[in-house]
Image (cartoon, rainbow, N blue to C red):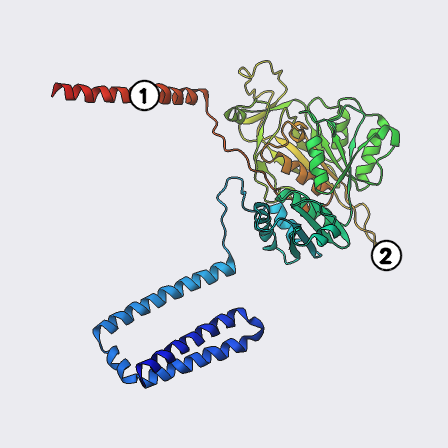
Amino acid sequence: MGKTQTLIIGILGSLLALAGVILHYYLTSRIWIGTVLIAAGLVFLALLAVRHFRQIKNLAGLRQTRLGANTLVLSLIILAILVLLNFLSVRHNPRKDFTKEGLFTISSQTIRVVKELQNDVKITSFFKDKSPEQEKFQDLIQEYQRFSPRLKVNEIDPDQEPTIAQNYGVAQYGTIVLESQGKSLKVKETSESELTNNLIKITRKETKKICFLDGHGERSLEDKDKPGLSQLKESLESEGYQTRQLLLMQEGKVPGECQLLVIASPTKPLLGQEEEAIDQFIQGGGASLILADPESTPELARIAAKFGIELGNGYIIDFVSRIFGGSLTMPLITKYAVHEITTNFRPATLFSTVRPVKKMDAPGYVVVELAQTGEQSFSTRQKLTSTEKIKFDPQKDTKGPITVAAVSTSRPKFEPDEDNPGKPEVSSRLVVFGDSDFATNSLFNFSGNSDFILNVINWLSQEKDLIAIRPKARAPSLVHLTPLQGKLIFYLSVMGLPLAILLFGLGIWWRRRRK
């Protein structure tokens, strides 16, 4: 066999084998074609090896060949290790987000919502092809799809397929349309919070209504100033709830449409009929949230006491607050009880002017002290005239930890029986806080405050799937300096460093002059 024939057979065999591998990988519907090409290539190469067996044998005996073979074997081993690592990384896809806010990892709430999807959700995006917004959406939706196969994504370029965009009523780039069970929603912001909130809305079977007691100087849902609850209202509506104000003195009783009654620190007394109506609502299997500041009306304490929760007098002092530059009457909470509300909940929460809450003995009710202050706190009735002079008095004050929130649940009052086999069990639920400021606009966005109050409301509304840590926006990276640290940096950079350079230069000049 001549050199030309040998070269042709070698090249042909190699090309057939390579083509077979490529087709075997990409032409999955007809794998046999790739297999045949690989086999044909191996036949040609085997024929070449047989015809030149003697030359191959002689070549194998050379020292250079043995060294080359060792190098080849080591190279193949390293290649095999790299292929194995790549295979494992694709199969298991390990990830680690090192950003403080977890900006490149979807939140635990999103993961829970996606995992709990019971029906397919079609997601149609309308982005300009290869635009930065499209790439951002692709990265985000891939994170969602890692946790559920029910998300079906279809990407449309409105410029290339304008008819589809018109059929969906889409008139601008960046619109995302969610479809499920005959319902449709449009999302016009490519963010995790918007996408998750709309997933909740489109998959929720019913819209639950939360009623806020009104008419007694309570915190207002419409107030956008610091004392208001407008941010809480927006967050609840973004999670698919409806909110309304309830004038109980007009309606006479809590309407059946109210899945939850929120009493946000009234400053005017409740009427006897209103107190009785609230009591009947909770005892009849209703759910209520009481936010009671130290100056709140005494009716709240009477209502809470019936369900095993005591609203104490006075307020809480916490010396840890000084570390963060806060007031002594603003306790920082990091200790939470084991409860469905606080599952996997670790962020700190900040309260302001809190009255103590305590567990009481109440037959038929189970009470859990939900959140407590640290060891360096205490509750007191002393008049606060100066934060520098107040000290713990063992004769009058109570040493921490002090409870700031408690949960009370009752056993079902109505159980299924032979006459009503389908009647669900109902249980009264009550959560009492010794403060309302933590839920207002002034502190709503502090660390875990928003998650805490929303988790409480979700639990009271029996929306356990929504209890989690919510998506966070990018926060500015700030360095907080004490006055002493600020002065030190100023003197070192503005005066110290230039002076040191000047002295160094003078020293060199003086040394050279003496020479």
> Quick check: 423 above or below 278?
below
Q: Which is in the foreground here, disc 2 or disc 1?
A: 1
CA–CA distance in space, label 2 to label 1: 90 Å
Instruction: Name the outermost residue toward the top.
Output: 385
Q: Crowding at label 2, few (<14), some or many (≥20) Cα neighbours within 10 Å? A: few
Q: Amino acid at mark 1?
A: Pro
Q: Is residue 91 visible?
A: yes
Q: Which quadrant would residue 433 be assigned to in this image?
A: top right
Which one is nearer the viewer's eye here, 237 or 59?
59
Marks 2/1 in contact by CB < 8 Å: the verdict is: no
The picture places residue 400, in percent across and down from the top left corner, at 57, 29
Circle 1 is placed at which residue position?
498
Instruction: Tell me, for residue 45, which label it has, or none.
Output: none
Q: State the image coordinates of residue 157 (x, y, percent, origin top left).
A: 64, 52
Residue 329 image offset from top left, x and y in percent: 59, 23
The answer to which quarter of the image holds residue 299 is top right
- The quarter of the displayed image where residue 513 is located: top left
- For the C terminus, the image quarter is top left
Which of the labelled discs sits on residue 418, or is there none? 2
Question: Would you place residue 181 above or below residue 260 in this image?
Answer: below
